[in-house]
Amino acid sequence: MYVAVKGGETAILNAGTLLAQARRGDPAVSEVSVAQIAGQLRLGVARVMAEGSLYDEELAALALKQAAGDQVEAIFLLRAYRTTLPRFGYSQPLDTARMAVRRRISATFKELPGGQVLGPTYDYTQRLLDFSLLAGGAAPVVAEAAQPLPEHLPRGVDLLGEEGLIEPELPPPGDPAPADLSREPLSFPAGRATRLQNLARGDEGFLLALGYSTQRGYSHTHPFAGEIRMGEVALEVVPEELGFAIQIGEITVTECQMVNQFAGSSTTPPQFTRGYGLAFGEAERKTMAMALVDRALRCAELGEEPAAPAQQAEFVLSHSDNVEAGGFVQHLKLPHYVDFQSELELVRRMRAAIASAQPAEEQTA
């Protein structure tokens, strides 16, 4: 039971003022702008957009600024704002095969059609502090490639598909419309489309830990990064008055397809299976972890025994949302005076009962 805190309105208002003061920091230092956050802290902005379920770099940067860099708080702010927006319809499925690629690598094929495109990555940098950044300076100039990339790069895993060595990507029977977790509560059993939607807005740290667990023996998967690609894809809608798709813009996404060995079954020959991840912005670590967890959650449909935490759909999906998790953990800060007093009285009675029983036991002895 919660009880209201009375007489604290002034204290609450002052706490809000102190928060704003702490967020601003030293007035002698120039205030960071939303444009600076969006342009220079793009990876943090991408996470807020992905887990806040709203693609808007400016609003995600604003949320980060308002939250003083606390990403979970910023995700909460963005998702709360999202609930106030009107919904005009649904976009068409993204065609990532037509992505304008800025980064595209494969750990399974050295010679990819179109080549490996490293793009912006920390993979080949030394994890040492770069003190030259303290001095600021002009933006580095990148040399342009001698030849431009092809307009569309084929997926690396399609090479396996050409030989029939990987499971085909087919819609479920009847091709039902996917559930919308922003409008409908999560229910079980959950289909793969619902699971992927949940994981796409799930907490990156939680998914990373689960994905890591699958690599340490708590699952029966041995994955390879079939392909990771990042770039811009067209966003299309079909207006009712037109009846055909039109492009309304572009968004940046990261896609990961993990390839996993599958020994086969009585009806399926040995082949590779897929784990899939997709997220807004540059979110390579998130999509890799998502793909690992997606494959682990497919254990039942592939005839595997769900023995590891990452294979337990209800456990994974019910605890992946950091807005729900943060709210439930932090609700413990709310007044629980009545609950605590009742437990305090119970402990006192139990101690009194034990104390009164001890003399009787001594007399009997």
Image: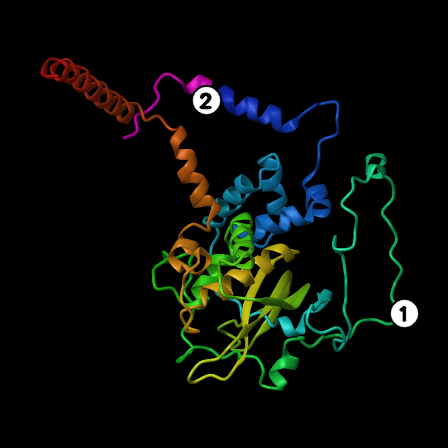
| Viewer-closest of 77 and 72 | 72
Dots 2 and 1: beta carbons under 8 Å? Answer: no
Q: Amino acid at mark 1?
A: Ala
The reply to whether residue 88 is in sight is: no
Task: Looking at the image, tell me whether mark 2 or mark 1 is earlier in sequence order.
Answer: 2
Q: Is residue 114 magenta?
A: no
Q: Position of residue 193 (x, y in %)?
A: 45, 67
Q: Is residue 6 magenta?
A: yes
Say which residue label 2 marks: 12
Say which residue label 1 marks: 146
The reply to whether residue 239 is in sight is: yes
Q: Amino acid at mark 2?
A: Ile
Q: Quadrant of residue 160?
A: bottom right
Q: Quadrant of residue 40?
A: top right
Secondary structure mostly seen in the magenta stretch: loop
- The correct choice, above or below, for 120 with respect to 2 in the image is below
| Viewer-closest of 245 and 356 | 356
Q: What residue is at 49 percent from the left and 50 percent from the top?
A: 82
Give the crowd class for mark 2: few <14, some 14-19, many >=20 residues within 10 Å: few
Tell me the quadrant of the picture where the C terminus can be found. Answer: top left
Query: Would residue 100 appear left or right of 347 to someone viewing this image?
Result: right
Whole-angstrom CA distance, mark 2 to mark 1, is: 61 Å
Q: Position of residue 182 (x, y in %)?
A: 43, 56
Looking at the rendered structure, the number of numbered marks drawn on it comes to 2
Q: Magenta segment range?
A: 1-11
- The correct choice, above or below, for 60 with respect to 158 in the image is above
Give the crowd class for mark 1: few <14, some 14-19, many >=20 residues within 10 Å: few
Q: Position of residue 32 (x, y in %)?
A: 71, 35
Local secondary structure at mark 1: loop
